[in-house]
Amino acid sequence: MLQLLPALSGAALAQPAGEAVQAAAPEDEKKEDAAPPQSNDKKTPLARYVVVESPVNDAIFRHVRNTALSLQDQASRENRAAFLFLEIRPGQSEFHQVSGLAQFLSSSKVNRLTTVAWVPETVTGNNVVVALGCNEIVMQPDASLGDIGRGRAVDVSEEQAVLSLVDKRHNLQVSHDLALGLMNPDVTLLQVSIERDGTTEKRIVTEQQAKVLRENQLAIVDAQVIKDKGKAGLFSGRQAREQGFLVTHTAAQQAELADLYRIDPQSLKVQASTPESKRVRLIEVTEIIDPVLESFIERQIQRALSEGAQTLIFQIKSPGGYLISGTNLAARIAELEEENIRTIAYIPEQALSSAAITALGCDEIYIGPSGQIGDAGVIQKRFDGAFERAPEKVVSPLVQTLKSLAEQKHRPAAVLEAMTLKDLQVYEVRHRDTGRIWYMSEEELADKPEWIKGPLVAESREDLLLTLQGDRAVELKIAEAVVEDIDALKDRLNIPPDVELKPVGRTWVDTLVYILNDPFITGFLFFIAIVCIYIELHFMIGFFGICAALCFGVFFWSRYLGGTATGLEMVLFLIGIACILMEVLVVPGFGVFGVTGGLLMLASLVLASETFNNLEPSVNSQKLVQALSMIGLPLLAVIVSSMFIGKYLPQIPVLKHIVLMPPTNRHAGDTDSLQLRPDLVEQNPLGVGRQGVSLTILRPSGKARFEDQIVDVVTQGPYVQPNTPIEIVESRGNRIVVREQDPSASSTS
């Protein structure tokens, strides 16, 4: 978490344990702590709250350790007090696990932290050792703590380990003898008052130790048994607080901790323990970010969520890609916070341009030692192939998006803006009252006098797009930490080492979508579809029409899953087909319906081929040219191919029997004996009202016989079956329009 918390009171800093921690700090930290008291008292403390589930295992240990180290680093960088609250849950754990955790909590690795054990309910057994490793213990008044051996004395080796821990005097409320009483029922504990130099000092001692004190001539003015021999060393929060040992404070509920330590109640939000490994999914982003990859990642996210994933890790190795795709992905990932999904970006190498924007949508960012993030400048390609910086109207919406992501994910907005604005200079600033370190631009500082301007961030020099690497990304509060590899990331995220993070794999559907979205494959689909339509007009058997429909169906399906097509394009295409059918079947002729249908189909194919937006006009123009080329080139290829198809198709042995050809024999009364007169192609003597009979099915075109002449005709209404009486209703050149003859009129004549 990068959000910092309210100031710690001077009273809390004055606790003995706090003094012990400061005394153990390295020399350079002591110099930082030597700042004027007034300034230090006003500094906002950092705080984290972790629930120590039972049983304590490796995952719990890693979670507490990583949280503590992260808090320690932040406290050191900002010279601020910090609290780590550990809620100790009842249960039983292996001794070596709790001992290791307690040793870590009392080590110099976290000497800048004040560790506080919160015990809201009775805890016995080995879990008590974790509380003994903390600087302070806070208990619910009716809760009890102790009886480590649960009615029996603990093993000698375990006893020595606990005594060694307590003898560090890490918690001044827990003494050597008190620890013995917590571990061994046979130990009698006394609380004695010793008078020395006019002052009275209270101690918790064993019966044997009390004898030693008397032998040393110390004046014991009062002695009270707090634990008899044979009874478990178990003390309630109320008893311990009244008699002044074991606990520092008592609290009826967790919320009172905020008042006791003068911290923001929001800091007591539980830091979730180790995520279940089966609920963690890895999604790889390793290609150019475009609409196809955008749609693929969205499907992976949905697939992971449907499997119950609660943590998504995006492993990003990408040089960038389309602006709109990167911002869409960032917005989609950021929205997962509302669904309580934890999102993590892992950048082992690079996440530049739109890939950087995608990463900034995640809750946390972890980066490799040589990993890079930034350089999100917007460029556009001119028609001559040269690149240039995008105009202001394209950059401004991106800047607003980055500001929104910065606010939502608690990162410095100026640092994010400098990734896309060359002339923006970023400065390190310090809050005048709290000492908080942040990063702002000159414009931000102008409205915030409480912030003191510091040095310029070197990476934001003029004419440079800000790019950060490794540790520098952590310092500027963009990344959480530097991790060496995926195993180190798992360790940071408390994922057991034996759990293998496998990326959400591509299904055969994903692979097929990638292939079908290739421009060459798309053009080939169009070519096949148009060829099938052309052949269908010759065969009139329906098979090739179905093939054409399948080609267009596959095209729209692949583009829908590829993210460039929506239901709108499909509806436009279907309306276009309906208009053309209306022109052919209902209103014959090439008119309004035919032209409208053709344009709608063309528009739907163009819109489905690319994603257009109002941010990049020049890019949209290039996409339009590419889409038209993808449709025009196959159409040109079909025109060339049609010449060969028309010439050689009737000669193919298998197909020549179904091609509509006129009969060649000359037997009277036999329709096969009639020949198509060539002169009918040039001029048509048949007039309106002439009656004949259909030779083939008219749907709507086909062949008909008028006496000894066979001609091509088009039906005006519905399909006409073969050998059906017809009459001519329109005759213009070689275009003859017919309709089925009215039976009543025929019989009358």
Image (cartoon, grey):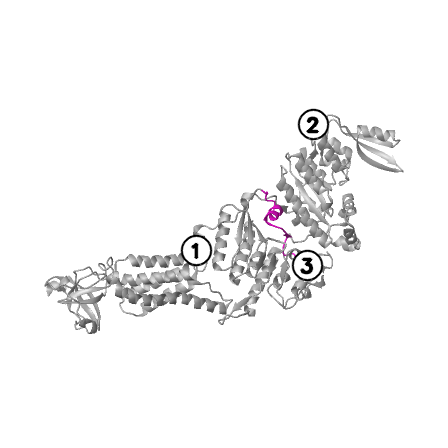
The residues bearing labels 3 and 1 have C-alpha atoms spaced at a distance of 45 Å
Asked if residue 594 lies left or right of residue 734, the reply is: right
Q: Earlier in the sequence, mark 3 or mark 1?
A: 3
Q: Depth check: 717 or 638 in front? A: 638
The residues bearing labels 2 and 3 have C-alpha atoms spaced at a distance of 54 Å
Q: Are marks 3 and 1 in contact (CB under 8 Å)?
A: no
Labels 3, 1: front one: 1
Q: Name the residue tied to disc 2.
A: 152
Q: Earlier in the sequence, mark 2 or mark 1?
A: 2
Mark 1: secondary structure: helix
Mark 2: secondary structure: loop
Q: Name the residue tied to disc 1.
A: 513
Residue 558 showing in the rendered view:
yes
Labels 2, 1: front one: 1
Q: Earlier in the sequence, mark 2 or mark 3?
A: 2
The residues bearing labels 2 and 1 have C-alpha atoms spaced at a distance of 67 Å
